[in-house]
Image (cartoon, rainbow, N blue to C red):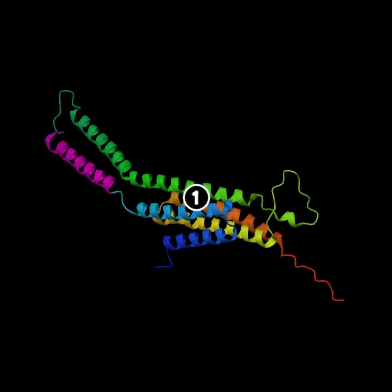
Amino acid sequence: MPYRTLDPDKIITTSERLAARIGERFQGSGLSNVAGELASLALDTKEKAALLEQPIWWLRALIAIVTVCGAMVFIFIGTFLSFDRIGPDGFDFVQGIEAGINTLVLAGLGYVTLFKAEERIKRRKVLDGLHSLRSLIHVIDMHQLTKDPVVFNQDFTPTASSPTRKLTRNGLSRYLDYCSEMLAVTGKLAALYAQAVPDTEVAEAVNDVEMLGSNLSRKIWQKIMLIGPEAKPVRKPRA
């Protein structure tokens, strides 16, 4: 169903269009460069998610070989070794059964570990991809950090170390809104990993990234609400 799964191509289109919008309004700005990096990361995420959806064939082939070899070993043990002979001490049969059980338990544990290897490999790759998204989220946050609407207060007095303020009310509002949109896109890119690898730990890690972006976006919108409307020029009354 087209509306029950995320389409990576549409997310890429959205990120590229967002980068173009930011580049047109804030040409040559650091935020424009970050938006371009987000669009590039969207392409990388699509490729990684597509690979994660595919089985690791070499690992599955290895599991099949190990399974066949293990079955042949147990067949050999059951066919050529005898457990019904009782030696002078009377413990040969018991020792044979104990050795067989220990071998079966160890083989089972090894098989389960090997069977879970594909899940662990994919989980590791997802965490690496989420690390890049988390880093980009913090970069976006750094760009909006000094964009404070308090500068539009009449009693605001900058200090010698205050950053240069060139944005108007409308410009600052658009700047912060773009930051919020970029954070939303990072959340959707993180969700692509959860869609590709349906794993509980992956879902929790993806949820942490989405919550990080949502919390920062909430703070950004609090700033936007404090900006207020653009001041209109006062017209002089006609004489």
Q: Return the residue nearer the eye: 27 or 223.
A: 27
Where is the N terminus found, in terms of image quarters?
A: bottom left
Q: Return the residue nearer the eye: 69 or 184.
A: 184
Q: Position of residue 141 (x, y in %)?
A: 59, 50
Residue at the location (55% across, 50% down)?
A: 137
Q: Quadrant of residue 107?
A: top left
Mark 1 crowdedness (10 Å alpha carbons): few <14, some 14-19, many ≥20: many
189 w.r.t. 1: above or below: above
Q: Return the residue nearer the eye: 34 or 213.
A: 34
As drawn, the residue found furthest toward the bottom would be 239
Magenta stretch: residue 161 in it?
no
Answer left or right for 122 relative to 62.
right
Q: Position of residue 219 (x, y in %)?
A: 64, 55
Q: Position of residue 216 (x, y in %)?
A: 60, 53
Q: Is residue 116 visible?
A: no
Q: Quadrant of residue 50?
A: bottom left
As drawn, the residue found furthest toward the front would be 239
Callout 1: SS: helix
Residue at the location (20% across, 31% down)?
A: 96
* Range drawn in magenta: 57-82
- SS majority, magenta: helix
185 w.r.t. 132: above or below: below
Q: Amino acid at mark 1?
A: Leu
Residue at the location (16% across, 38% down)?
A: 78
- Residue identified by numbered label 1: 133
